[in-house]
């Protein structure tokens, strides 16, 4: 059975693992493991995830296959700039091509509609070509590039949006 559902506090350890495993696959060729580990330890520490879970401007969902969490997505409402971001969208490599990413994207877009915005924003590393191609197929347009730091590694990050 496959489903995408709202995240639960009890999902947070699985979300940590999904992030780590997908990063190894997606970023392993251009971000050293020690830099990925430093970033993961600071941004995906259980307390940090619990704080995000409790936030009024952050939401999330998980993709579940046969009762195992195999993906997750997180959204963020930037109240100051009135922008809605999909800040994370990860699916374990063995479960990609099952349309789980698309379902999680739609989940985030439905949340964005509650904020009465006309687009959702996200960022993707320029070296993550499969993700960029996938986002293009989903209708994203990338207009800007900014540096993004993971540990000691600095990578250009494309920022773009999809009209909803």
Image (tube, helix red, strand yellow):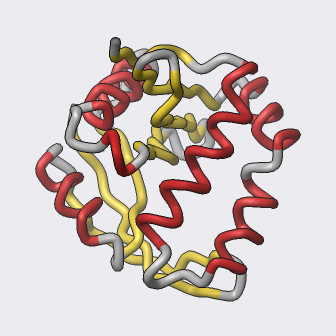
Q: Which residue is drawn at 52% across and 66% down?
A: 24
**Quarter-of-image position of residue 111:** top left
Height in image: 13 above or below 144? above
Number of labels in the image equals 0
Q: Residue at x 41, y 66 (%)?
A: 26
Height in image: 14 above or below 35? above
Height in image: 123 above or below 140? below
- Left or right of 1? Residue 36 is right
Q: Could you say where residue 37 lies in the image, as x and y percent from the top left?
A: 72, 69
- Left or right of 134? Residue 27 is right
Q: In which quarter of the image is the C terminus?
A: top left
Between residue 158 and residue 117, name the one nearer to us. 158
- Left or right of 15? Residue 84 is left
**Quarter-of-image position of residue 114:** top left
Q: Could you say where residue 103 lies in the image, as x and y percent from the top left?
A: 29, 26
Q: Which residue is drawn at 40% across and 22% down?
A: 65
Q: Which residue lies furthest to the right in this view?
A: 47
Q: In which quarter of the image is the N terminus?
A: top left
Q: Which residue is drawn at 57% across and 86% down?
A: 154
Q: Could you say where residue 144 lies in the image, as x and y percent from the top left?
A: 34, 72
């Amino acid at each position: 059975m496959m489903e995408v559902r709202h995240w639960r506090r009890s999902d947070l350890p699985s979300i940590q693992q999904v992030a780590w495993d997908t990063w190894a696959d997606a970023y392993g060729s251009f971000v050293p493991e020690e830099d990925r580990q430093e970033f993961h330890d600071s941004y995906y520490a259980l307390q940090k995830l619990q704080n995000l879970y409790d936030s009024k401007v952050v939401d999330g969902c998980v993709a579940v296959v046969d009762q195992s969490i195999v993906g997750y997505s997180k959204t963020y409402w930037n109240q100051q700039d009135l922008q809605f971001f999909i800040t994370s969208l990860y699916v374990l490599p063995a479960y990609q091509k099952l349309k789980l990413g698309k379902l999680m994207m739609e989940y985030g877009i439905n949340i964005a509609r509650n904020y009465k915005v006309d687009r959702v924003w996200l960022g993707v590393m320029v070296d993550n070509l499969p993700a960029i191609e996938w986002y293009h197929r989903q209708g994203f347009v990338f207009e800007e590039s900014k540096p993004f730091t993971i540990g000691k590694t600095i990578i250009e990050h494309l920022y773009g949006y999809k009209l909803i």
